[in-house]
Image (cartoon, grey):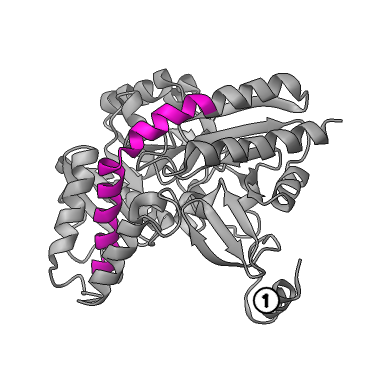
Amino acid sequence: MGQATDEVMQQYERYVMNTYVRQPLVITKAKGSRVWDVEGHEYLDLFPGWGVGGLGYNHPWVTAALRGQAGRVLHVSNNYYHPLQWRAAKRLITASFDGTVFFTNSGAEAVETAVKLSRRWGGGRHEIIVMERSFHGRTMAALSATGQSKHQEGFEPLLAGFVRVPFNDLAAAQAAVTPKTVAVLVEPIQGEGGVRVADDEFLTGLRRLCDERRLLLIMDEIQTGMGRTGTWFAYQRSGAEPDLLLVAKMLGGGFPIGAVVAKRALAGVLSPGTHATTYGGSPLGCACVLAAFEAIEKQRLLERVNTLSPILFERLRALKERVPAIREVRGRGFMAGIELAASGKPIVEACRAKRLLINCTQETVLRLLPALTITRAQLDRGLGVLEETLVESSR
């Protein structure tokens, strides 16, 4: 750790609110799956931007769209029109299902929108069934919906009306339905919950339950969407189409923007004056959304995920056979979790020392969310460092 890094960290300590567990790394430049620190050291990042960097850092098509739009108009209030918003909405609908779109600034704001829409649609029904170990964000409704008590401590009283059931337990979800229930909220893969994959039968069972009991099915694809699992959205593998789809992270190719896609039958639930956001659907954000879709489609990145993902998981499962500390390997596409028998923090730190950046969630689950643009050589190199580190730690 160099002097420049120390100086930046000291200034953060003085001026920036301490709400994150930061690694001692000051990033000043990035491209693709590589970043450089303030001392000029290069790192390979297998967890770019907590999944925001799904196209890698500074994808040239996204940065060109951003620069071009910045020269025309930065912001248009939502009581006027601009042509990029309907085009971005149409592109989202084309990749998912017929409906209408409300643009937000973040994933948490998308969750808040879905909660409001569901309650307004429910006509007095207000309870939403949520999953244990789920994570939906830090704002109050999103936090209240989250199925992890550790994130909620100290913020009580939470928003009432969220009923937790075990993930992948259809019988428990069925038993939780009451006359007050209005919706079911689920992640097809729980990211912060430890990269836990929903069974197809669970998702199709929830769809059937919602149809039978006139409930809304809400899919939180904030982390799984935009090709992360090899399809545009993870729900598409099961065929359990939601009523509300929540998207963010990769949506803007690195630019902050989120969205809610609602089935067309729900289009009129949030009428003028019932919900709004100042920055949602800005010209800058929508230009980046269109560029991100174009990059994924024209550079055939879904195909790349489906080609490289089997290699990724084959190597991780082979590593499990060599390292007794690995309890389980989970995931799909470019979303992988390696559950350890002990804390994953030392592994993250050891990898960083070898110029590889990864993440640990739930204290014991190493998490990889490589960019869809990563090369085979980069993936091999990153996995080689991870394998070396885990083998060394097991001696």
Task: Identify residue for label 1.
Answer: 8
Report the side of 344 relative to 249 (left or right): right
- Give the residue drawn at x 18%, y 60%: 85
Amino acid at dot 1: Val
- Give the residue drawn at x 40%, y 21%: 200
In terms of depth relative to the viewer, which is nearer, 119 or 195? Answer: 195
Percent position (x, y) of residue 76? Answer: 21, 74
Q: Is residue 359 visible?
A: yes
The chief SS type of the magenta part is helix
380, above or below 371, in the image: above
In terms of depth relative to the viewer, which is nearer, 105 or 244? Answer: 105
Which residues are the magenta region? Answer: 282-311
SS of the residue under disc 1:
helix
152, above or below 28, in the image: above
| Residue found at the far right of this picture | 395
In terms of depth relative to the viewer, which is nearer, 387 or 167? Answer: 387
Residue 6 location, quadrant:
bottom right
Percent position (x, y) of residue 282? Answer: 26, 67
Q: Judge whether residue 103 is colored magenta.
A: no
Percent position (x, y) of residue 75? Answer: 25, 75
Report the side of 10 relative to 168 (left or right): right
